[in-house]
Structures are given as C-alpha cells and as structure tokens.
Image (cartoon, rainbow, N blue to C red):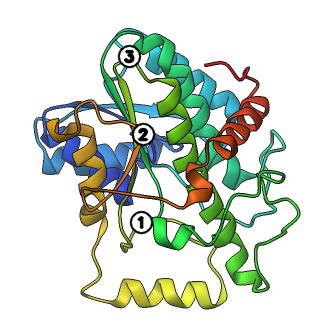
Amino acid sequence: MTGATGGIGEAIARRLAAAGMTVVLVGRSDERLDRARARIAAAVPDAELLLERADLSLLAEVRELAKRLGAEPPPDVVVSNAAVITDFREVTSEGISRILATNHLAPYLLLRSLVRPIGRRAARFVLVGGHPGGLARVPVDLDDLGSRTGRGLGPLPSFRPFVAYARTKNMNAMFGYALARRLAGTRITVNGAHPGVVTDTGLGKGALRGTLRIYSLLLRLNPAAPGPDAGADTPAWLATTPDVEGISGSFFVKRQRVGTAPHTTDAARCDRLWDESARLVGLGPAL
C-alpha cells in the first residue's frame, strides 16, 4: 500500500488489515509510518502491519523497494495510491519532475518490477486515479511528460500544478490499460479506481495557491463532504472482492465499471507513454 501514512491510503490500509490481510505500509518518513501503524493498530487490534520506507519520487529508492517486496513471498495485492501536487517545475535530485516521478513513474517502475517475482501466482494491481469526466479535458502531452514547458497548463498560475497533477492521473489510467494488455493470459489483473472528491487527503498540502486553495479550504469546511474512509471504499473493494475476479484493464467509480476519455484508451497513445516511461526509468519496452 503506497501513500499509506495518511488520507485515503491509510484508510485503504486499515480496511485491508480489517479483512485479515498482512499489509505493507509504504511511506517516505519513518515517523509518519510509525504513527500510521499505531492508528491502524488502534482501530484493528489484530492487524498484521509491516513498514517499508521509500521516497517514491526517487527511482533508485523505488528499485530497491521493488527488490524487497519481490522477495518471497511477493505481494498478492499492490495498491498504488501515493501522489503529490507540487510546482510543476520542481525536479528531484535525479533530474525528473517530482510530480511525474511520484505519481506515474514510481507505479510504472514498481508494478513492472513485481511482475516477474509474482510469476504464475494470482495478484491484483490497483491504481488509484482521478475522476474520468474531469480528466477528459487534460490529455497527456506525450512530448512533454514532465510538463517542463508549461505548455497547455492554462493561464492561471495557481491552477498549473493541479493540471500537471491531472495529467499524471490520466497517465495512471493509460499505464493500467497498457499493463493489462501485456499481462493478458496471466493471473495478474490491473484495474483503476477513482476514490471520489474527499477531504483530508493531505494531497497538495502547502502547494495549493489562489482559487484552488480557496476551493480546498471550502471543501474541508463542508461538514457534508466525504472523508478518506469514503474514498477508500472502491480501491479496497477492488483489492478484495471476488466480484472482480479475472477482470482486468478496467476503471471503476463507486464500484461501477466506467469508461475513460478516448485519449486515455487509444492503444497507440498508451504504447507511446509506455515506451517513453520505460526510457525514463531505464527499462526496455518489453515487459
């Protein structure tokens, strides 16, 4: 469970622990991991929880995480939830856009790296994505995955980080479709899920500005707004329910299979994203 130290990720982890699963919490801070473990254990006293510290914005740390997780026994379920909203110009020490590295390249590298260790076993990959309707308006710029140029991010500076983030959420869906096609005939399934618009996710904390910050504040002040536990419902359901046994290459909202924008399902576009992502993480295009 990536992004497991708060918000939707912690809520998903708590549900999986309550279902009797041994849950590996992945986060970038030992302190936050310890606090999340304590909160989940308080809610689920018999929870079996393991901790893995990794900064998912750094591909070197993602590779090491994949090696540790791929050791026997490899995971039966991987929920990719970690995401950030930062200034679209911010880059990591590896010279990659932090938004792109954390939100797309990390799950791309992690899940690809776990396919071989899982082998013939049954497993589920769940990618936590964005709202299909809203994301239809922000197609991925396949010539500028990291939004380095700022092209197409809109005229309002306060919204540009969110548009860059939204593009990476479309990348999650495209990657899911491309990976599912490549895993056809195996016992590994890949599906995406939108958790809904919820409060207290911690997403973009400190990075939101202007109108977007006002909207976030209003959402948190709305007593009727759903919280992280509501957002955890569909991803946790996908990870555990027998209802989706054998279903792969789909996207779900409120436990219902839905379509996403044509620019996310086009096989040629998905393959271009796959190949460029492979180059950026140092892998060949073949799975």
Look at label 3 and name its amino acid: Pro
Left/right placement of residue 196 relative to residue 64 reads left
Most extreme residue toward the right is 149
Q: Position of residue 109 (x, y in %)?
A: 61, 30
Q: Amino acid at mark 1?
A: Thr
**Is disc 1 placed on a helix, strand or loop?**
loop
Q: Are marks 1 and 3 in contact (CB under 8 Å)?
A: no
Residue 55 shows up from this direction: no
According to the picture, the residue beneath numbered tag 3 turns out to be: 74
Q: Which x, y percent locates residue 206?
A: 61, 72
> Would you name the residue on which mark 2 appears?
249
Name the residue tied to disc 1.
201
Instruction: Name the image quarter holding residue 213.
Output: bottom right
Residue type beneath disc 2: Gly
Q: Nearer the viewer, mark 2 or mark 3?
A: 2
Please say if 255 is above or below 20. below
